[in-house]
Amino acid sequence: MTTINHNPFEHLCKDETARETAVRKAFTNIKAQIKEMLPEFRYSFLMDYLEIDNPSIGIYEFVSPVINISYRESFQEISYSKNRHVRTRISLHAFSELTRIIYRETAKENTAVNIEDCLNEQKYNHKVFEKAVEKHNTDNEG
């Protein structure tokens, strides 16, 4: 009798690895393009941001007074929220460009695998940036 060692779920594992790579790459590209935009903002306080990497729990964040973006490895998800109250302070075009960057980098035409369903839009929470700055200042004391 011949035994065939074939895992019927092997293709799913390969797809998940490709998906994880594509989502991580999209997050990295989104972050880089948003950082390039910051000097275009009219007010210096809107150019502030923090990057918070927690590899032990698989959460990576970019937080600012304008936009917050996070990547969660376990869900292979990119969450984002834009502060609609700063639209007129950075220009409507720049505010819209933030959304275009996110969707361009996750479009199936631009990724090795379809990751369009990895996006999760959330309501902007001002406290996220304030808490991030507070934690950053506490961690860097003394």
Image: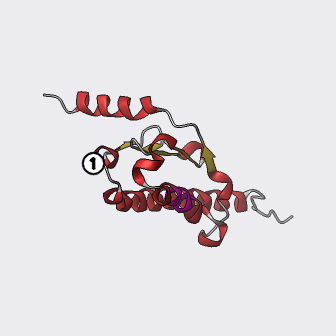
Horizontal side of residue 18 vs 36, given as left or right: right
* Between 70 and 91, the one nearer to me in the picture: 91
Q: Is residue 20 left or right of residue 134?
A: right
Check residue 101 for magenta coloring: yes
Residue positioned most to the front: 88
Circle 1: residue type? Ser
- Position of residue 48 relative to residue 112, above or below, is above
Of 41 and 129, which appears nearest the observer?
41
How far across and down, in percent of the image, does residue 126 sit? 44, 32
Name which quarter of the figure residue 65 lies in: top left
Left of 131 or right of it: where is 44? left
* Residue at screen point 65% across, 72% down: 109
Question: Looking at this view, is 49 or 39 the one in front?
Answer: 39
- Quick one: SS at disc 1? helix
Residue at mark 1: 44
Residue 112 position within the rendered picture, expressed as x and y whole percent measured from the top left: 61, 70
135 over 108 or under it: above or below: above
In which quadrant will I find the N terminus?
Answer: bottom right
Q: Give residue 63's quadrant in the image.
A: top left
Residue 131 drawn at (x, y percent): 37, 29
- Which residues fall within the magenta stretch? 96-102
